[in-house]
Amino acid sequence: MTAAPPAAPPADGERISAADAAAGLNHYLATVAGDPGAGWELLTYRRQAVEDWDSYQEFWSSIASARVSNCTVDEQVGRAQCTIHTTTKSGKSNSAKTTLWVTREDGVVKIDVAGGGNPAHLDAEARLESYRADDLPWLSHDGRWVLVLSAKRPGITDELQTAANGTHTFYFPDILAEYESLASRLYDVDVLMLRTADFGKQGGTDLWFTVADPGGLNSEEDAKAWCAAAFPELSGKALSNQCLPRKMTAPHW
């Protein structure tokens, strides 16, 4: 199977009850353990975008059965904390605590990214996509040096940074807040919103990139010097985590 391109996002997510979340998770797990392709269709377009189909298929093709138990569900955001039980086709069983995110689309419970279909998260995602749409027409893949200021996906944890929500875990509203804060701070340079598919080496997780493009950087050393001047309060790992030189090349494998 070749995974289809993600579908267009729904206008809004539908709130899901605790009972429906648990039932939906068990339906998904029973489906994907028997048919990874059918399970793929029970992922939201957001979750499909951050999954690698080959790895997904390889893993679930090795699983004979899967289910969840002891789920605690936050109905407001669609977060389910459960124990997941899996048995491989070779007979090995495993149980582990996990956090899954669910939402309902057109009456169907689907597995989502961290943050799920919460309206605030959907609105933040739409605003990020709008910024990206504004920036893409002007993007030039000419190999110039730029600075990656952020590379995140919903649910990612960065111990060196604090999200707008006060934790180290970033969701769509936090990615948006970080982008807008950096764009405001660096008002005199172009600050772009891009995704993995828009530039550079492809593969792996789909990330949302905040990229500074000041121009006039002729080497990696120039780019590092720019970072040090732009973020004088940071040094060492904290600085490289906040401002990483990278060449603006066309998407390639």
Image: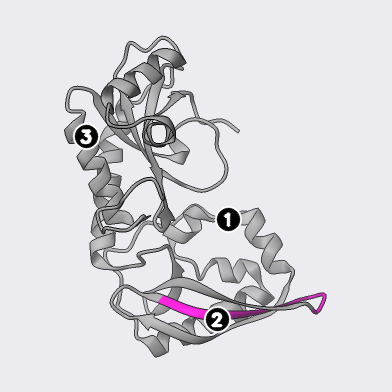
Residue at position x 42%, y 54% in the image: 157
Q: Which residues are magenta?
A: 80-91
Between disc 2 and disc 1, the foreground one is 2
Q: Which residue is label 1 attached to?
A: 3
Residue at position x 52%, y 48% in the image: 205
| Disc nearer the start of the sequence (2/1) | 1
Kindly indicate whether the residue at mark 3 contacts the one at mark 1 (C-beta within 8 angstroms).
no
Whether residue 28 sits left or right of residue 116 in the image: it is: right
Whether residue 63 sits left or right of residue 212 in the image: it is: right
Pointer 2: residues within 10 angstroms few (<14), some, or many (20+)?
some
Q: CA distance from mark 1 to mark 3?
A: 35 Å
* Amino acid type, label 1: Ala
Picture coordinates of residue 243, whole percent (x, y): 37, 30
Picture coordinates of residue 21, whole percent (x, y): 42, 82
Picture coordinates of residue 11, whole percent (x, y): 27, 63
Residue at position x 28%, y 46% in the image: 128
Between disc 1 and disc 3, the foreground one is 3
| Disc nearer the start of the sequence (1/3) | 1
Is residue 240 placed above or below 178 in the rendered structure?
above
Secondary structure category for the residue under label 3: helix
Q: Which residue is label 3 attached to?
A: 183
Pointer 1: residues within 10 angstroms few (<14), some, or many (20+)?
few
Q: How is the image coloured?
A: one colour
Q: Please state, as top left, top right, bottom left or bottom right, where the C terminus lies in the image.
A: top right
Residue at position x 59%, y 53% in the image: 52
Res 114 → quadrant: bottom left
| Disc nearer the start of the sequence (3/2) | 2
Q: Main secondary structure of the magenta part?
A: strand
